[in-house]
């Protein structure tokens, strides 16, 4: 673990209707007893404003899962960072590998979305991670550091943001890297952040994501430079997600 408060973020992906608000309420109630942890849930954008009402007054934050670089305009189907903030979000996940793969999001596009998030006062969580082929061919560190360098605009130095290391092969598969492998990548990301931003590069938490579950969270969160977790499947049920928060 790193020294500042751990940051645990739930990514609901394409899951959740109004029925899921009860889980969000339970998570908000559960995190009141976890003072040394920052916690956010990123439901589908359609739930944000209702979720904001449900969790009013709690320490749970809400986030989006993507945003468009522009404030508004002729971009059918897209949502701007300002719209997410207006609906109650404080954070936004950007550059998730599912978006990089399915929608061809490049580092340059992700960097422009990060700028948009900062412009709107949101805390971006920038996702990076290698594929299984890249890991097997010894390219993991080069790929991940390249994504960090390419996805961060220079103004991020003056703002709050987080990086999430999510090996693509560990997402939704039940597979996780060893603690040594996680630490190796997190240390490389920290060193890249220091190279880019100088002392400001020491601040951003580096989260681990990819099959984080109640039974492996404590071990993963012990890792050097592991500042929290980005949790997919196990964030959908309040009981599982709160067990991960409790593992900090
Ligand atoms: P998972 O997803 O926890 O279901 O592996 C993590 C993520 O994609 O953020």
Image: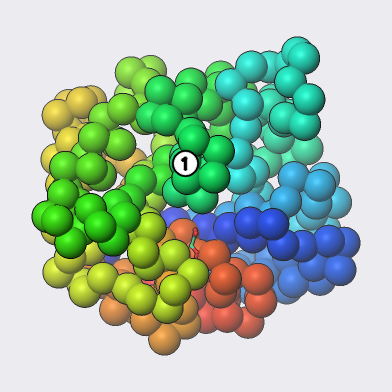
At 44% from the left and 74% from the top, the residue drawn is 173
Q: Is residue 227 visible?
A: no
Whether disc 1's CB lies below 8 Å from ligand 1 is answered no
Q: Is residue 202 above or below residue 71?
A: below
| Colour treatment of the image | rainbow
Residue extending farthest bottom: 215
Give x and y (percent) for residue 206: 32, 50
- Image quarter hosting the N terminus: bottom left
Residue highlighted by disc 1? 100
Tell me: 47 left or right of 61: right
Give x and y (percent) for residue 174: 42, 78
At 54% from the left and 65% from the top, the residue drawn is 232
- SS assignment at label 1: helix
Q: Is residue 46 above or below residue 246?
A: above
At 85% from the left and 51% from the top, the residue drawn is 50
Query: Residue 106 occupies which quadrant of the picture?
Result: top left
- Image quarter hosting the C terminus: bottom left
């Amino acid at each position: 673990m790193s020294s500042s408060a751990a940051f645990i973020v739930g990514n609901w992906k394409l899951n959740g209707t109004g029925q899921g608000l009860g889980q969000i309420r339970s998570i908000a109630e559960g995190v009141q007893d976890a003072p040394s942890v920052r916690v956010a849930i990123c439901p589908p954008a359609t739930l944000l404003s209702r979720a904001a009402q449900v969790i009013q007054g709690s320490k749970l934050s809400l986030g989006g899962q993507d945003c468009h670089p522009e404030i508004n305009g002729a971009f059918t189907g897209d949502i701007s960072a300002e719209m997410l903030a207006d609906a109650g979000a404080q954070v936004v996940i950007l550059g998730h590998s599912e978006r990089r793969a399915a929608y061809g999001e490049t580092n340059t596009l992700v960097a422009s979305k990060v700028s948009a998030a900062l412009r709107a006062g949101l805390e971006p969580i920038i996702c990076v991670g290698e594929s299984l082929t890249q890991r097997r061919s010894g390219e993991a560190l080069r790929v991940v550091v390249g994504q960090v360098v390419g996805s961060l605009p220079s103004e991020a130095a003056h703002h709050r943001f987080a990086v999430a290391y999510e090996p693509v092969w560990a997402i939704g598969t039940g597979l996780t890297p060893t603690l040594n492998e996680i630490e190796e990548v997190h240390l490389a990301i920290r060193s890249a952040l220091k190279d880019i931003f100088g002392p400001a590069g020491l601040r951003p938490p580096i989260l681990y994501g990819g099959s984080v579950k109640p039974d492996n969270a404590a071990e993963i969160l012990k890792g050097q430079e592991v500042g929290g977790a980005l949790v997919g499947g196990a964030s959908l049920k309040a009981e599982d997600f709160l067990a991960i928060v409790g593992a900090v």
